[in-house]
Structure formats: C-alpha cells, structure tokens
Amino acid sequence: MKIGCHAVLFTNRILTETENILRGLKSAGCEGVEIGSRFFGLDKREYLLEALNSQRLYLAGLHVSIQWMDLLNKPEAAEESIVKGAEFLQVMPYKNIILTGMIGAGPSTAEEAERDPVLRNPQAVKKMAENLNEMAEKAADRGVSVNYHNHCWEFENEGLLFLSLMEHAPKVNFALDTGWAAVSGYDPAGLIEAAPDRFRYVHLRDYKKEMMEGKKTFAQKQEGYVDLGTGDMDYRRLMDALKKAMGPDDWAVVEYEKGEVSFERYQKAVDYLKKFV
C-alpha cells in the first residue's frame, strides 16, 4: 500500500499555497495527497497535476461531498457532483473519488436524535444505496472508483447507513475513516477483515478513549483525536489487516483536521506508519 496525507488541515490554503504545501508534504515522506474539492475547486486540474508532478507526488484521492437525502429526493444533484469529480480525475494516474455523504447543513453540532427520520428507515436507506450504486457503476465505466468516506452517523441505528452500502451498493468501495469507526464502537480492523475486497483506501487517525467519554456531537468528538501513535488505536492490528487487504496501488492516508498546522506532524505520522509497513 501507499502512504498519503490529507490536506484538509490546510483548508483553503491548498488552493492559494498549493506548491508550498505539496513541497512540505513531500518532505514529510508521503507518496500522495488527498485534496477536497470544497477547498481546491474543480477548475485547475492541469495546474494541480503539474504541481504534483514537480514534487513526484500523486493525487491519492479527490474528496467530494453529497447529501444523503439527495440520493433519495434529488439523485441528479448527487450524480452531478460525482460526474464532475470523475471528469477532474481523468488526467490523474489514480482516479479515486473519496465521497462523503452529509446529513444536513450542520452535522457538526447535531446529535443523533436530531437526524432526519428518513435516515432511520431501512427501505428508504436501501433505495439511497441502490441509487449510489448506479452512480458508482457509471463512474467505474470511466475508470473512476467511488470510495465512500464515513463519519460517525453511518454507524448510528446499528450501522444502518454503512451496512446498507455494504449490502446494496457493491460497486461502492469504502474509504474507511478508522477513527470515526472506532469512536462509534466499531473495530476498523474487524470491518476490513470481514470484507477485504471493499477497502482500497483508508483514513488513518488516532484517539484517546478518555477524551471521547461523554462527547455526543460530531464537533465534540473531533476534539478527542490525537496525533498518530499517541493514542489508543491498535495500529499493529490495524496495519496487519490493511497489509492483507490492500494492494500496492491502494492508499492509507493520514488525516489531521484539528490542531497545529505543521508538516512535522505528518512526518512523525509517516515515520510511525513505516514501522508497520
């Protein structure tokens, strides 16, 4: 597997300081970067490709967001986002859409009880998954892999959203966020071991159990994440599962969203991971 770094920590600086950030991430030891379309946009792909090539880096994945409810009520809106992402990736060696399904305008402060009740309806969620599967199949015809990226809400209601994608969207792979899975009560290594062919891409995080205690909302839980190798994630077991499931062109990506904005954090994380790889 290849080791990458997610540029989300730099937010919109990835657009205004692209070359400096790519240079810093290269110096940290990663082989590729994940970039979010919400920060970089979709109109400068040739510029990005040139900047990546100059640092001998790859675009590991393009992060794209849709609304879960659009998969039921406005599937054309969700499909448009995926089509635009697929078009952007046509010039990239690795054609991975990292797809987030949002559950409203502001999930960061909402608790589980405040979710749209439709997201607790198994038949409605099944239809959403089936619609996404059709979109992923069309993307695959263009050589693009749709990899669903979870947060915490996919594991609510006994994992209804996540398990529906697993069962009813076979053309969708998973960009498993190991941190959100773990703090939601699911063992990331166990998920990978149960269906290794569905995991071609992962986001790697670490967390402190005591820091997560009592935290109920997305925003609160975000504060419980720590730098890789300093928390309670069993990385030896997790990396063993990944090595068995992933091939040489699959990606394990370090994700930091909060805390100090520095390349040194990424370097320490990459060095830590290399002990297992």
Image (cartoon, rainbow, N blue to C red):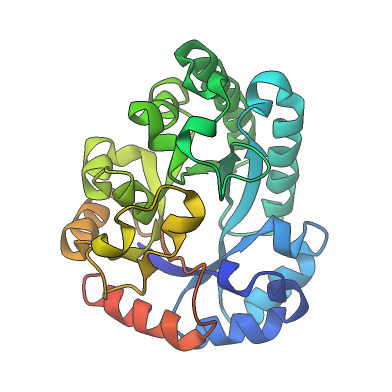
Horizontal and vertical percent position of residue 98 = 55, 49
Please say if 159 is above or below 143. Answer: above
- Among the 4 quarters of the image, the one containing residue 82: top right
Name the residue nearer the viewer: 146 or 41. Answer: 41
Residue 110: percent from the left, percent from the top?
55, 42
Residue 249 in view of the camera: no
Can residue 175 be seen here? The reply is yes
> Does 47 appear above or below 133?
below
Tell me which residue sits at (58%, 67%) in the image: 8
Q: Quadrant of the C terminus?
A: bottom left
The N terminus is located in which quarter?
Answer: bottom left
Q: Residue at x 39, y 22 (%)?
A: 167
> Is residue 175 rendered to the left or right of residue 81?
left
Q: Residue furthest right?
A: 43
Depth order, front residue of 30/260? 260
Total numbered badges shown on the rendered structure: 0
Q: Residue 69: x percent and y percent?
A: 64, 27
Residue found at the very far front of the displayed protein: 214
User: Residue 197: x, y in percent?
Assistant: 33, 39
Please name the residue shown 22% across and 57% down the image: 238
> In the depicted view, which residue is nearer to us: 161 or 138?
161
- Is 195 drawn above or below residue 272 in the view shown? above
Q: Residue at x 19, y 61 (%)?
A: 234
